[in-house]
Structure formats: C-alpha cells, structure tokens
Image: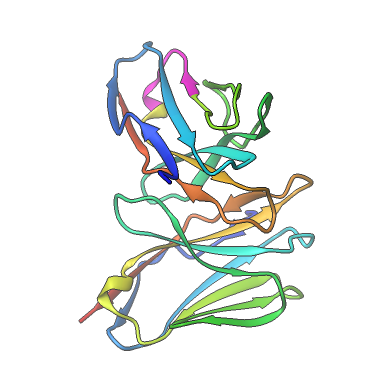
C-alpha cells in the first residue's frame, strides 16, 4: 500500500496563478481532509470530504476549492494565488471520524511570490 | 478560549527524564483524543489514542485523560534525543467529529 500520496512536493507560484494539489489514497478510506500548516502552528482544516461527491468547508476555506469524484482522489484547487497561501499543505484520510486515526501524506510546500 | 490549546514550548528535557506534554480542550462533548508526533519537515504520525478517563500506556508513552477537567496529557518516560519533535494534540469535535488540532508543543531532548 502506498498510503496517502501527494503531488507535487514543492511548488513556487506567482501571485494570481492557479494550481491543483493532488491527493490520492489506496486504503479505501471514506474520509479525506486538506490541512495547511504555517510555521510554528498546528494544522488548520481547509476542506474535508466524508465520501465521493460530498465535501464541506473547514476552518479556512477561502481561496480554495475541492472536489471528490472518486473514493481515492481529493484534489485541492487554489485560484488566484496570494502570498497568504504560502504554507505546507497536508492531505489526510481516515476510515471514519471520531475514533479513527488519520493517515497523512508527505505534504506539499507551496510558496507564492 | 481556543478549542484545543497546547503550550508551544519549546520544552527542553535531559536524556532519560520524563517529558510531560499537556493539552486542554473546550468542547465537553469530545469523546476521543489523539496525540501525533511530527518530526521537522515530515508529516504527523499517530503515537497515542485515548477515549476513557485515566491512563493508557504504550511502551515509553502514557496518555492521561481527565474529561471533568477537560485535559489530556502525554508522558514520555526515559526521553531520548530521537523523541525531539513537535507533538500535536487532536480532538474530534462538533456534530461531524472532525479533528481539531492544537498548535503543537516542541520537545527537545538534549544528551
């Protein structure tokens, strides 16, 4: 099992550009999440999904969009990149919520200049 | 009051000592609690999960939960330099029980 994979590992964007961060899991997990982590801070939830076709906003959704057309994939779209979106982005998955461990991908380090 | 609070540290302890990390939470309805370890430049990984009041031990790690006082602690016995990392407390909350993370406590174990 590859677990949770993310691409790319690093990316530099210019202000106003757009991009999609890819996330995939092969554990047949229902729940998937996108977090961002700024230096010295914990993880802030951007969006999450409880199954294919179902997504919901987290704590910091502005400037991002998601879709979940399959169980395996959960891409995160950044539209009109801003310097405030410079961060490390982690995708995670879990079988369910509440009592289930989250498995994290390796992260994408994004810089917007 | 923040939903999940941790002292950001750094907490510095000598090798072989006990490291004590604390986490408080605001949602009285929370029923499960996770501790993740995150090495610098890496992703978080689960080290402890607890849902009953009292202590849960796993090797050198002990999680302590007190729901009445709304705190959960992580004790690391015989601390090693390899334990140097940031420890994140995660508490599923709200109707959907999606985990909310604290900002993490940085632990430094010096030889």
* Location of residue A34 with respect to A67 vertically, above or below: below
Q: Magenta includes A18? A: no
In this picture, residue A36 sits left or right of residue B30 = left
Residue found at x 75% / y 44%: B96
Residue found at x 29% / y 79%: B80
Q: Quadrant of the C terminus of chain B?
A: bottom left
Residue A108 in the image: state x and y as whole percent: 35, 35
Q: Magenta includes A79? A: yes
Which span is picked out in magenta? A76-84
Residue A81 in the image: state x and y as whole percent: 40, 17
Instruction: Identify the image quadrant of residue B9.
Output: bottom left
* Location of residue A25 with respect to B15 vertically, above or below: above
In depth, the one of A17 and A49 nearer the eye is: A49
In this picture, residue A105 sits left or right of residue A45 = left
Q: Quadrant of the N terminus of chain B?
A: bottom right
Residue B5 in the image: state x and y as whole percent: 57, 60
For the image, the number of numbered tags is 0
Residue found at x 37% / y 40%: A107
* Location of residue B42 with respect to A72 vertically, above or below: below
Tell me the colour scheme of the image: rainbow
* Location of residue B55 with respect to B82 vertically, above or below: below
Point out the residue furthest to the left here: B111
Residue A44 in the image: state x and y as whole percent: 53, 42
Q: Is residue A11 visible from the viewing direction of this image?
A: yes
In depth, the one of B99 and A62 nearer the eye is: B99
């Amino acid at each position: 099992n590859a677990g949770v994979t993310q691409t790319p590992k690093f990316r530099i964007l210019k202000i106003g550009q757009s991009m999609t961060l890819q996330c995939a899991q092969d554990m047949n997990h229902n729940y998937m999440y996108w977090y961002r982590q700024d230096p010295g801070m914990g993880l802030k939830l951007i969006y999450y999904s409880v199954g294919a076709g179902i997504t919901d906003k987290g704590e910091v959704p502005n400037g991002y969009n998601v879709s979940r057309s399959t169980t395996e994939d959960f891409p995160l779209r950044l539209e009109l990149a801003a310097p405030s979106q410079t961060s490390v982005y982690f995708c995670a998955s879990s079988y369910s919520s509440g009592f289930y461990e989250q498995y994290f991908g390796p992260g994408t380090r994004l810089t917007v200049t | 009051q923040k939903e999940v609070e941790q002292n950001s540290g750094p907490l510095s302890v000598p090798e072989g000592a006990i490291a004590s990390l604390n986490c408080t939470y605001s949602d009285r309805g929370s029923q499960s609690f996770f501790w993740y370890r995150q090495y610098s430049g890496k992703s978080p990984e689960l080290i402890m999960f607890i849902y009953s009041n009292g202590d849960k031990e796993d090797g050198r790690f002990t999680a302590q939960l007190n729901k009445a006082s709304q705190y959960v602690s992580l004790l690391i016995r015989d601390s090693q330099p390899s334990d140097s990392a940031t420890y994140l407390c995660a508490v599923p909350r709200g109707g959907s029980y999606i985990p909310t993370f604290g900002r993490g406590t940085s632990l430094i174990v010096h030889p």
